[in-house]
Image (cartoon, helix red, strand yellow):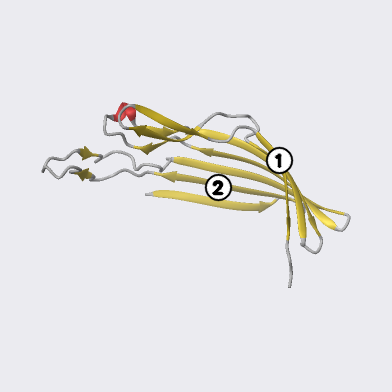
């Protein structure tokens, strides 16, 4: 069970605020498996959290727009949080379960879009605080755990063109 709330507010003619928050209370009521078919339960996750289901998440966007020449400029400051969660359960024991880290990411972008919406150019920065965080872990043959990490601080420029018939 859970709850998700989203809201959008136009604070001024040019400034918009978008916010969302989510809460998820999920666990396996009964989860047992006989993986080698010998009649004995090998895996019992009953009462444990559902994997890849963080308990809390939230996001906040400040979006400011204004005209520029024949187009529009849009500035977006975004912060988002995701709680830690079990990524995958280990056969060895709870201490070896793969997890994702909780994280708060801060992102920013500036976009120019032509008045006829035919093209855009965007400069962006993601993970501005350069937070290091796991986005997944997998136990490998009960020998070690392989971890996957989210992207470090990243800057870039991108663009797009719409071809009309």
Q: Which residue is depicted at the point 26% across and 30% down?
A: 92
Q: Which residue is depicted at the point 64% across and 45% down?
A: 61
Foreground pick, 44 / 19: 44
Q: Which residue is depicted at the point 38% across and 29% down?
A: 145
Vertical position of residue 112 compared to residue 162: above or below: above
Foreground pick, 6 / 153: 153
Q: Nearer the viewer, mark 2 or mark 1?
A: 1
Q: Which residue is depicted at the point 48% across and 46% down?
A: 22
Determine the residue located farthest toward the right in the rendered image: 69
Q: Earlier in the sequence, mark 2 or mark 1?
A: 2
| Quadrant position of residue 24 | top left
The answer to whether residue 155 is left or right of residue 67 is: left
Q: CA distance from mark 2 to mark 1?
A: 26 Å
The answer to whether residue 157 is left or right of residue 30 is: right
Residue 109 picture location, percent across and down:
71, 43
Circle 1: element type:
strand
Circle 2 residues within 10 Å: few <14, some 14–19, many ≥20 = some
The answer to whether residue 13 is left or right of residue 148 is: right
Circle 2: element type:
strand
Circle 1 residues within 10 Å: few <14, some 14–19, many ≥20 = few
Residue 21 picture location, percent across and down:
52, 45
Pointer 2 residue = 20
Residue 113 picture location, percent across and down:
78, 55
Pointer 1 residue = 156
Vertical position of residue 59 compared to residue 72: above or below: above
Q: Quadrant of the C terminus?
A: bottom right
Residue 143 picture location, percent across and down:
32, 26
């Amino acid at each position: 069970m859970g709850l998700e709330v989203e809201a959008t507010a136009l604070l001024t003619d040019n400034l918009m605020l978008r916010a969302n928050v989510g809460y998820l209370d999920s666990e396996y009521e009964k989860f047992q498996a006989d993986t080698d078919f010998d009649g004995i339960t090998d895996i019992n996750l009953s009462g444990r959290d559902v994997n890849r289901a963080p308990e809390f998440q939230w996001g906040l966007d400040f979006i400011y727009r204004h005209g520029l020449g024949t187009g529009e400029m849009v500035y977006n400051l975004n912060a988002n949080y995701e709680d830690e969660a079990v990524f995958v359960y280990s056969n060895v024991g709870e201490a070896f379960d793969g997890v994702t880290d909780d994280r708060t990411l801060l992102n920013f972008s500036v976009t120019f879009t032509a008045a006829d919406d035919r093209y855009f150019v965007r400069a962006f920065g993601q993970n501005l605080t350069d937070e290091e965080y796991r986005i997944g872990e997998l136990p490998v043959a009960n020998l070690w755990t392989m971890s996957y990490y989210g992207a470090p601080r990243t800057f870039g420029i991108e663009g797009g063109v719409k071809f009309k018939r």
